[in-house]
Image (cartoon, rainbow, N blue to C red):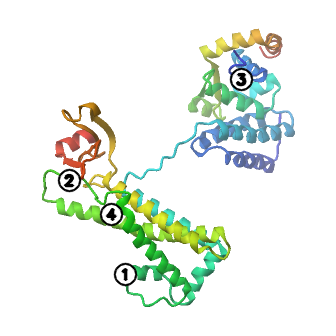
Amino acid sequence: MNGDTPAVSAFAQRIVIECAALVVPYPIRKDWLFKWNSELWYVRREASASKDVWGFCLGAFRDARWMRRYSPKESVPLNLDSPLNCLMFLISLALSSLLVALLLPGARNVMLLSLHTDSSFYWLHSWAGVSESPPNPIDQQIVVFRLTFIFACAILPAVTTLRLGGDSGSSSPGSRLIRFHGLVFFLLKVMLISPLVYFAALDLGYLSAPSGNCFIQVIASLAGFLLSLRWAFNDQRRRCPTCLYRLDSPVRMGRPSWILLDWNRLEYLCPKGHGVLHVPAESVSGSFGQTWTSMDSHWNEMLQS
Amino acid sequence: MPEELGLSYTIAMVLQSISLGHVYGYRVMEVTGLPSGTVYPALGRLERDELILSRWEKQAKAEAAQRPPRKYYKVTRAGNAMLQVARARYPLLAKFAIAAEKEYV
C-alpha cells in the first residue's frame, strides 16, 4: 500500500501526467487525462513502492507519444467557404508576412526607416495617388511595387477572364444591391492582397540576401500579384452572388460526345439554396458562358432542411 | 497472421491477459509485468485494431464506492480469433496464461 505518499509527491505525479497530456492531440486529451488520472488513483492505492508510482507516471509519456503518432489525424480543412473566413484568412496571411518582415533585420530596417522619414504607409498613399514624389529610396521601392501591380493587371486578361459572376437570366429588385455586395467583397480581397504581396515580396528579397535583392522582390511581387488576382477573380466567380458563400456540389450534366444535341456543363449549387451556376464544359469565343439561375425561397427552405 | 498485423508477443500477451479477465490497465500491468509505457500503448493499439473494446464504468457506481471510474476492456470476436492464431504462433502464451490464472484466479 502506498497510502502515506506525501501530498507533494501526489501533486508532482499529477503534474507529470499533465505534462505528458500536452503531447496528446487536443481532441482526445481530456479523455486521455481522465483515464490516466483514474488509473493513477488506483496505482497510488495499490502500488507497493513509491518508485512504482513514479514509473507508472513516466510511462504516460510513452503512451502520449503513441497517441500523438497513431491517433486519427484531425483534418483541419481550410474553410474559405464563407466570405468572412476568406477575408480573415487573407488578413492572417498579410499579418504573417508582416511578422516575417519584422523578424528579418534588413526588412525591419527598411520599414523603420520609412517610419522615421514620415513615409510610413506610403504604399497606401500611392494607391490613392495623393503622395508626393518619393522622398527616399524606400519609397522608390514602393513605386516599383505599384508598377508591378499595374503590369500584373495589364497581363491578367491573358491568364483569366475579367468577369466576376455568371449572367443572370432574370433580374430581381435587389440585384443591384447584391452586385454591390459582391463588388465590395472583391475589392476587399484585392485590398488585402496588396499588403500581403508587398510584405511577402519583401520577405523573399531579404531572405535571399541580407541587404535585399531588388530583382527577386520585383519578380516575386509580379508573380504574387498575377497569381493572387487570378485567384481573386476565379474565387469570385465560384461564389453565390447573394450570400457570397462558395458554391459546392458540382454535378456534370450531359455528355461531351453529344455537345450538339444536349447540354454538356458543370452545375454548382449554392449551399444556402440561392441558386445554381451553370458552367459550360467548352467555352465559346465571344461568350462568357457561365450563367446563374436564382432559385426561389421554396428551394432555400428545402436545401436548409 | 499476428505478424501480418504486427501483433508482437508483448501485445499478444496483453490481449491474452484481457481475455483471462484482467480487464483494466493496471491489472494487465501487474499480470504481465510490463511497464505502463508498454501496456497502455498496447491497449490503445488493440482498441484501434478493434481487437478489444473499452467502456467506462458507470459514474454513479464509482461514486458510491468513493473512487474514480475505471476503464474496462473486453476482447472482441476478432480479438479472440486473433488470439487463437497468436497462441499457435507463440506457444509461450499458453504457459503465461496458466501462470496468470494460478496467480490471480
User: In the drawing, what numbered circle is on residue A185?
Assistant: 4
| Chain containing mark 4 | A
Nearer mark to the viewer, of 2 and 4 = 2
Helix, strand or loop at label 3? It is loop
Q: Position of residue A123 (x, y in %)?
A: 46, 79
Task: Compute the Cα span from label 4 to label 3.
Answer: 54 Å
What's under tag 3, amino acid-wise? Gly
Residue for badge 3: B6
Residue matched to label 2: A167
Disc 1/disc 2 C-alpha distance (Å) = 32 Å
Residue at left 67%, top 48%?
Answer: A22
Count of labels in the image: 4
Q: Residues within 10 Å of mark 4 (few under 14, many from 20)?
A: some
Q: Amino acid at mark 2?
A: Asp
Image quadrant assignment for residue B67 = top right
Q: Which residue is mark 1?
A: A128
Residue, x 73% and y 49% (percent of image)? Answer: A15
Residues at marks 4 and 3 on the same chain: no
